[in-house]
Image: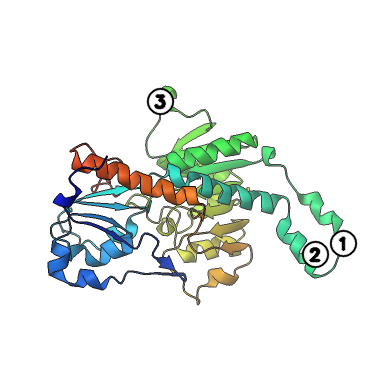
Amino acid sequence: MIKNVAKFKVTVLNLFSKVGGEYADEVPELEDKVFASKIEVMFVDLPVLAKYRKNLVNLKWAHTAWNGVDILMKTFEKDEPLPNFILTKTPGSLNAEHITEYVIGYIIAKERLFFQARKSQQKSKWEQMIYAQSRVLSSLTIGILGAGEIGLHLAKSCKEFKMKVWGLTRREHPPETRSQYIDVYRTTNQLEELLENCDYICNILPSTPQTKDMLSGNVLENCKAKKSVFINVGRGDVVDEESIVKAINNGWLGGAVLDVFHEEPLPSSSSLWNLPGVIVTPHVSGWSSDGSHTSNLLACFVDNLNRYVTGQPLKGALDWSQGY
């Protein structure tokens, strides 16, 4: 039970503020520094927090439904002290099922040639022989960049389809800590080996100084032997747009499905919109209209709210020094 809620100000702002393809961050009330200074606790979307954080001088704790915090971290100056307030995030496990279905759905669509089937239908042509190119998932290898909650959920589903799974982690995992769903572990300094051996490369890494531009430049040339398909549901700054375009045009990649980008919304002038072999979606891989999903999001906040008022440690607290 929540006790003594009257002792502090709780403000719930823009739980779902990404509307119409743009991030809504306008909250006029927070322009009022007196009002903002009274807020101790917030359930807030990160664009709002990023824009008004300097007015929230007495903020003690903010909770967000977002997984990635790069939109907030980018607002800090180079030598700016780390914030004094605690930021907690909804656990990735709540989005893991949605993101896994997004990734698996695309792989099945590509391997069962659904996209080509649609083109044949539009031409009213009975083209059976194109399906001779189809592959079963059990013959494929996927490399998952980021073996956290979401990555392991994806790995488990891939193993159910009998795929071989490689997982990329920051540090070496001793045998007793390894997941049964990952066949081959590699660390970031072994990235090239992973890229060379996987039919699909799925990025689920957070945005950190270490992951920024990890795949930029000619790194994706390591995919050319298998013509890997790159799927990005992690953070857009793991690779720049120019590098993706180059990899597609040079035949290093066999395609890409991109849900996150360096700049969001993706500008209409971007060549990614019409690049052959590329699927673009507007950062929605973790979305769901299912009522239970919303209830679970709110339950995480309420659980932490109870912890806050009773002085217990909060779940899902961000490590400001690491950025995740």
Residue 74: percent from the left, percent from the top? Answer: 28, 61
Residue 123 in sight? yes
Determine whether 10 is above or below 125 in the image: above
> Which residue carries the number 2 mark?
120
| Residue drawn 61% across the image and 46% down it | 199
Say which label, 3 or 1, has the lower sequence index.
Answer: 1
Q: Residue at x 47, y 71 (%)?
A: 20
- 51 displayed left or right of 154: left
- At a point 40% along the width and 30% down the height, the residue shown is 173
Q: Position of residue 16 (x, y in %)?
A: 40, 61
**Label 3 belongs to which residue?**
174
Instruction: Name the element at disc 3.
Output: loop
Locate residue 96 relative to residue 78 in the image: left or right: right
Q: Mark 1 packing: few (<14 Cα in 10 Å), some, or many (20+)?
A: few
Q: CA distance from mark 3 to mark 2?
A: 50 Å
Q: Nearer the viewer, residue 288 or 105?
A: 288
Q: The residue under label 2 is which amino acid type? A: Ser
Asked if the residues shown at circle 1 and circle 2 are in contact, with their CB atoms under 8 angstroms apart, the answer is: yes
The percent coordinates of residue 208 (x first, y second) are 33, 51
Kindly check if marks 3 and 1 are in contact, taking CB atoms under 8 A apart as contact.
Answer: no
Residue of label 1: 126
Measured in 3D between alpha carbons, the distance from the residue under mark 1 to the one under mark 2, in whole angstroms, is 7 Å
Name the kind of residue labelled 3 in the image.
Pro
